Image (cartoon, grey):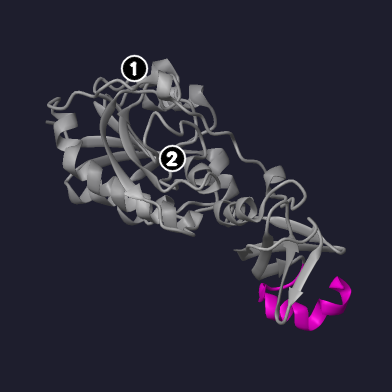
Amino acid sequence: MSKKIIFFGNERFATGTTSKLLIIKALVNLGYDIEYIILSQKDINKNKPEIVDFAINHNIKIIYFENNESLYSQLLNLKTEFAVLASFGRIIPAKILDLFSGGIINIHPSLLPLHRGPTPLESVILEGQNKTGISIIKLVLKMDSGPIYAQESIAIKPNVRKQELANTLDQKASELLSKIIDDITTYKLDPVPQTDNDATYDKMITKKDSMLNPLSHTAIQLERQIRAHETWPRSLLKIKGFDLIVLKAHVLEDKIEPGSIYINGETFGVGTLDGILVIDELLPMGKNKMSSRAFLAGYKNKLL
């Protein structure tokens, strides 16, 4: 059995999160030889991921590519049997898939066929789900549709934030991959096809999705959005001439006019379609992050 592997991706399970790199560390600890790490030059230009320093410290070469043609030309003569992919963010064309006779092992942070697509972590938080998980599949051309080698579920903690969920799923992924990778690479484990009729698809999140709209959403929906959009695209609330990035909030089950200001002692919030979104921590534009109490100390009169 060859223990040579090519690793695609940065292992960041959601935009704006960081990674402890537990998957690639598990592969190294199991004795796999990571020949190359494949990263998009575009992603590196935005924000250098943690895996770059890992590669340097472990003498692993990185292939930076501009497009599929340049990637294909760099992989063509490597003759590596298997690859592992975690958060690559690109559709891999057939001619690159065909370079790996054993296939590309794709690690996806949802219980497929649920939550196919680019935002499974954000989506389960936005929907208020109480369960998600890790699916390890064989990569095929159609997005997140490959047959499944193994799955494991996790409970989603109440009020979980995106980074915390990413950390938990990274840990679960590393544990699950460690159990089955040898069976995959020795062809002892056959993947099971997904049921396409049960598939759900998550939409791409853009900067425009950062807006908090209390006129059209409930307090529960907005509080979930704040946790799901942690670090990116964040959650922007416009009230009384202020542009506020809301970092933490909670729901008060009370009724006031949607969009109106709620002040009670040292806390404030905004009325929504149903309930009050009480702001706990915020970042006014051009200022440092602060508590609701600190914001009221300086700006309460302007909210009235």
Q: Nearer the viewer, residue 106 or 70?
A: 106
Identified at 24% across, 48% down, the residue is: 175
Report the side of 243 relative to 103 (left or right): right
Quadrant for residue 157, please give it: bottom left
Q: Nearer the viewer, mark 2 or mark 1?
A: 2
Label 1 crowd (10 A; few <14 / some 14-19 / many >=20):
few
Q: Is 292 included in the stretch rendered in magenta?
A: yes
Residue in front for this viewpoint, 88 or 202:
202
The image's mark for residue 87 is 2
| Relative side of 277 to 27, left or right | right
Is residue 139 in the magenta section? Answer: no
Q: Quadrant of residue 185?
A: top left
Q: On the rendered image, what quadrant is the C terminus found in? A: bottom right
Residue at horizontal 67%, vertical 62%?
A: 277
Q: From the viewer's side, name the closer residue of 218 and 102.
A: 218
137 vs 27: above or below: above
- Please, what secondary structure does the residue beneath circle 2 have? loop
The reply to whether residue 227 is visible in this rendering is yes
Residue 156: percent from the left, percent from the top? 40, 52
In the rendered image, residue 68, in percent from the top left (x then y), is placed at 50, 24
| Amino acid on which the number 2 mark rests in the picture | Ser
Give me the disc on residue 98. 1
CA–CA distance between discs 2 and 1?
Answer: 20 Å
Q: Main secondary structure of the magenta part?
A: helix
Is 247 placed above or below 148 here? below
At 24% from the left edge and 23% from the top edge, which residue is drawn?
102
Q: Position of residue 229 (x, y in %)?
A: 59, 52
Write the start and end of the magenta stretch as one range: 286-304
68 lies above or below 260? above
